[in-house]
Amino acid sequence: MRREGLPERVWSAPGRVNLIGDHTDYNDGFALPFALPLRTVVRARPCTDGVIHARSAGHEDVTFAPPGQPGDVAGWGSYVAGVAWALQQSGLDTPGADLTISSAVPVGAGLSSSHSLECAVALALCGLAGLEPDRTELARIIQRAENDYVGAPTGLLDQMAVLHSVPDHLSFFDARALSVEPVPAGLADQGLVLLVIDTNAPHQHVDGAYAERRQACEEAARRLGVVALRDVEDVAAALTELGDDVVMRRARYVLGENARVLQSVDLVRAGRLAEVGPVLTQSHEAARTDFENTVPEVDVAVQSAVSAGALGARMTGGGFGGAVIALVESTRVPQVEAAVTQAFTEHGFTAATFLPVTPARGAGTGE
């Protein structure tokens, strides 16, 4: 039975953009994400029947009694059910709830719409129960929901970025230490804009491509006798030892990406954000050739943005579609958008959409 008349409470969580450092988190490496101003909002009331009722416009309503088992709920509802299951598996007893969910985070764009949903739901369920779990521990719980219930072998970067981000800061993430250090971005002071280009080429992680990349990285670490690729000290020697095969190329991308993240953090700290631009473009080229997780839409978006004057650009997120992040001087944003639009028209792609963004706050109460 629902508790009619009880006040509605609201929690929300942002999507995230990873400026640089993708596929490094499950290799114990580094990344530099930040929170988007676009958010998933959960309006919640407790229920006395112990059942969770979830609704979202454009989707079928979902009703289930936690904890249940992985596989009980499919589709979009699996993210909600997975969070409830993982919370209870972790010993956090959350109540039944009536959840109304809305989101401005584009689905399939590589902007972490799923983790935005999961983090907002987790905070709502914990909030209704009067629980305030440590946010890093909550990130682990949400990872378990994603890995063991939804079936996506993701790392912890997205959850940590969504839960720990600070406005106007980039988040220097160390996957091994499970730490997030806010780094002032200084965009406005340097006359720069971070431009998200949603290519509208949908991506999927719950398939073999993401898992295959992760398995190749694990195989590279095994061959090299290290716990994770982060532990490689002599990169040239390691790549020679791996030989010329797919596993070597996957490892070369990750090892290079870790170095590029550290380089970018140093530049941002020094107030030299503009110099991160070429590093972004190098990252994209490595993803295209070594990790092979780009698609024509993101390649064209990067090439046309840089040709039109962007300081640098790269695909962001897990890949196989999704969005591009470009670092652009504020005065050049219109010409970059025009160039990408023209290039997409010439290639017959679905039109891209553009969103200039400033790093936003992490998950919490309110909209």
Image (cartoon, rainbow, N blue to C red):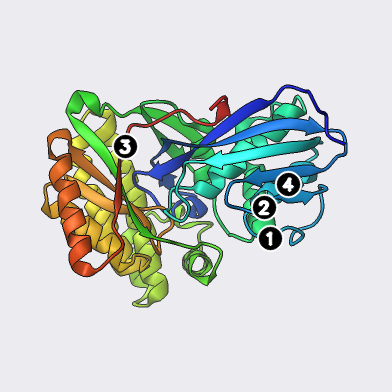
Residue at image location 39% in from the left, 45% down from the top: 18
For the residues labelled 4 and 3, the Cα–Cα distance comes to 33 Å
Residue 94: quadrant of the picture: top right
Q: Earlier in the sequence, mark 1 or mark 3?
A: 1
- Of the 4 image quadrants, the one containing the N terminus is top right
SS assignment at label 2: helix
Left or right: 342 as drawn, with respect to 263: left
Local crowd size for mark 2, using a 10 Å CA cut-off: few (<14), some (14–19), many (≥20): many
Q: Amino acid at mark 1?
A: Ala
Residue at image location 30% in from the left, 29% down from the top: 185
Per the image, the residue denoted by label 3 is 265
Which labelled disc corresponds to residue 74?
1
Nearer the observer, disc 4 or disc 3?
4
Per the image, the residue denoted by label 2 is 77
Foreground pick, 157 / 123: 123
Q: Position of residue 112 (x, y in %)?
A: 48, 48
Foreground pick, 110 / 62: 62
SS assignment at label 1: loop
Q: Position of residue 181 (x, y in %)?
A: 44, 30
Which labelled disc corresponds to residue 86?
4
Q: Position of residue 209 (x, y in %)?
A: 48, 69
Callout 1 touching callout 4 (CB < 8 Å): no
Residue 244: quadrant of the picture: bottom left
